[in-house]
Amino acid sequence: MIKITLPDGAVREYREGTSSLEIAKSISEGLARKIIAASVNGEVWDATRPIQTDASLKLLTWNDPEGKSTFWHSTAHLMAEAVESIFPGVKFWVGPAVENGFYYDMDLGDRQITEEDLRKLEVKMAELAAKQNPYIRTSISKADAIHFFQEKGDEYKLDLLEHLQDGEITFYSQGSFTDLCRGPHIPDTGFIKALKLTNIAGAYWKGDEKNKQLTRIYGVSFPSKKELDEYLLMLEEAKKRDHRKLGKEMGIYTTDDEVGQGLILWMPNGTIIIEELEKLAKETEQAAGYHRVVTPHIAKESLYLTSGHLPYYQESMYPPMELDGTKYYLKSMNCPHHHKIFAAEPRSYKELPLRLAEYGTCYRYEQSGELFGLMRVRCLHMNDAHIYCSKEDFAQEFRSVNEMYLKYFKIFGIDKYVMRLSLHDPANLGKKYINEPQLWLETEAMVRKALLESNTPFVEVTGEGAFYGPKIDVQIWSAIGREFTLATNQVDFAQGRRFKLEYTNRENQPETPLIIHRAPLGTHERFIGFLLEHYAGKFPLWLAPQQVKVLPISDKYMEYAQTVLESLKNADIRAAIDDRSEKIGKKIRDTELARVPFMLIIGEKEMDAKQVSVRRQGKGDLGAQELDSFIKELKTEIKLRS
RNA sequence: GCCGUUGUAGCUCAGUGGUAGAGCACUUCCUUGGUAAGGAAGAGGUCAAGAGUUCAAUUCUCUUCAACGGCUCCA
């Protein structure tokens, strides 16, 4: 007999070789029907796999993250079975579960797959699922596994096998399909009651663009039709929040073929938001001891040779323009220009930390397929600053920058983000990263220490650093779930030396400063794209392009409405009047849909009492009040940025 | 850049081998109405651009451009 410990601490005895599914059945038949997999001593197993020793057991259902991923991974196998039946000879690479479903990468040879094929595959999959074929696990020797895939002529699976040890290789079969797989899987295909193949994409083998491109099919599946419908509804809702849709609808920005891809034209409403953000940044930076500077958009080649941009970052830069035999580049980062401002005068330790700030315009030649609304563009305006400081000051400066982030995030109500410590990849030294292995490690340790000391939760990722040093990125997700770096805080040990930047220390010796690059508000483009989605277009009063709309009930009150508008404008409130000869209900509806925070309704009552009736977007009628007190309240709300 | 899909009025979308429609928005007129859609008329399109097939192309084919979903890459 073996002892099974359940999550509530209860210990039950079973005979050796009892499966999790059988244990579930012994507890309740209803429970057993929902069991997808089981966590046995912390490892996710098939629910049907016999347990031979004492173990702690957690039964996993659709509601557990591991349950979902097992479910999706099994659906990937089901899809592979369907693909193989329709496209014989197909070779598979890997088919994992992802955040919202699964995919399988495959080599279809010369054949192409279309949307129509996806519909056919869905039908086939539903058919196969209904057969309730069990997923059968078998252990196999490496030699036999190699033999199996050699027979099949499948070089991809043979490649996978190379990295596996004999004795740890398992196959899974369901119906007519057998795959090399570590598992685990759901008990049988009948669990899959609803599914949708969402899209076809090319994906480079092993994620390397030099390799052959495989066909990737994405899909998602559910234990019931209801859940699929809910998922599809959720996708529809997310689309409504998409900054590209809102940005167009609200007159925030536009693009034009003749101007160029990824080059944003900010319309008047978007420009208002830009100006409000810059005002916030200027106030905040002035209080934190920054100095504002302004630098040109282009510079000579030699500047970027010194900075390291040309050796390490050239593929992201626009090609040069040549004038009188000299090459000029559009700047992709502001740092070299700021370094030259530092270098323009002899510096003393007394001036440090020196903080130079600029909402700098940068141009980056992003590959066309990478462009994405406002989130990924080719001309961007960065909330940039460079802090030149001594080693001793570093930790304090670094913490202050992090505090500034949190201050901003509080203003915008940003609470869903992840701080990521982005490190270099030693394999790419001298290619993507400046070749200073020792300095990389030292600096990374320094940043990690500063993070730990300030109790900031973070994750570490290798291969995401800047070419000149490690960074802390603040990761956010767009409405459609794509991940972006919103803000960044970087340490640069390289450019100070490359530019021979120096200050005179207390001992009257020249010393190279450390440089912190920081952009807490990221770029206007990405930040406003994010804010559009974050607020679903309903900006807080201080950011709203239009703050108040005056709605006269009929033309008779237009004159009084005009005086109300004048008073609002005199108080620097962004207001307009709806002078169409429409009924008040229509004016209210249109203004609500335009997401204007306040409406002032002006009729006979208001005119006689010299008042305004206030209506707040999304909240409805707030009653009548004196115009002066309304303006005063508005000004307070704007000032507090609440 | 690569794989796949798409491109018809300002927006959302129908449609066809014989050169085009709807709703909303817009303009004008009627209406002057009290908290989410009053009525009527009108204007608006080289059907993304170029080439080919055809008596005839917005429709079929090819190329280019752009957008979208991914891959790679990044703020």
Image (cartoon, coloured by chain):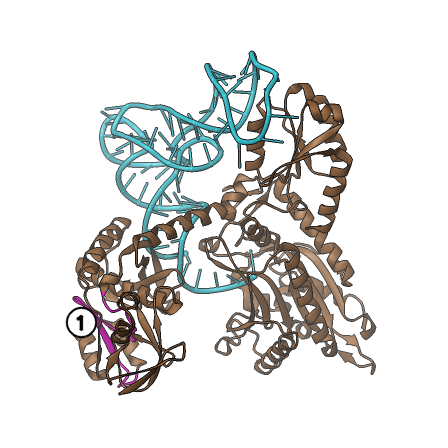
Observer able to see residue A259: no
**x, y percent for residue A89:** 18, 64
Task: Tell whether position A166 is magenta.
Answer: yes
Q: Amino acid at mark 1?
A: Lys
Q: Name the spot of residue A501 as percent of width and height, x first.
A: 73, 72
Q: Position of residue A322 (x, y in %)?
A: 60, 55
Whether residue A448 sits left or right of residue A54 in the image: it is right
Closer to us: A470 or A636:
A636
Report the residue at 53% width, 39% height from top.
A249
Q: Colour of chain B?
A: cyan
Residue at image point 73% right, 62% down: A356
In this orientation, which residue lies closer to the viewer: B69 or B67? B69
Range of residues picked out in magenta: A165-188
Q: Quadrant of the N terminus of chain A?
A: bottom left
Q: Nearer the viewer, residue A255 or A498?
A: A255
- Magenta span: predominant SS is loop
- Which residue is tagged 1? A152
User: In the figure, A84 relative to A430: above or below?
Assistant: above
A442 falls in the magenta region: no
How many other residues sit within 10 Å of disc 1, few (<14), some (14-19) or many (≥20)? few
Q: Quadrant of residue A144?
A: bottom left
SS of the residue at dot 1?
A: helix
The colour one sees for chain A in the rendered image is brown
- Name the residue: 30% across, 52% down: A225
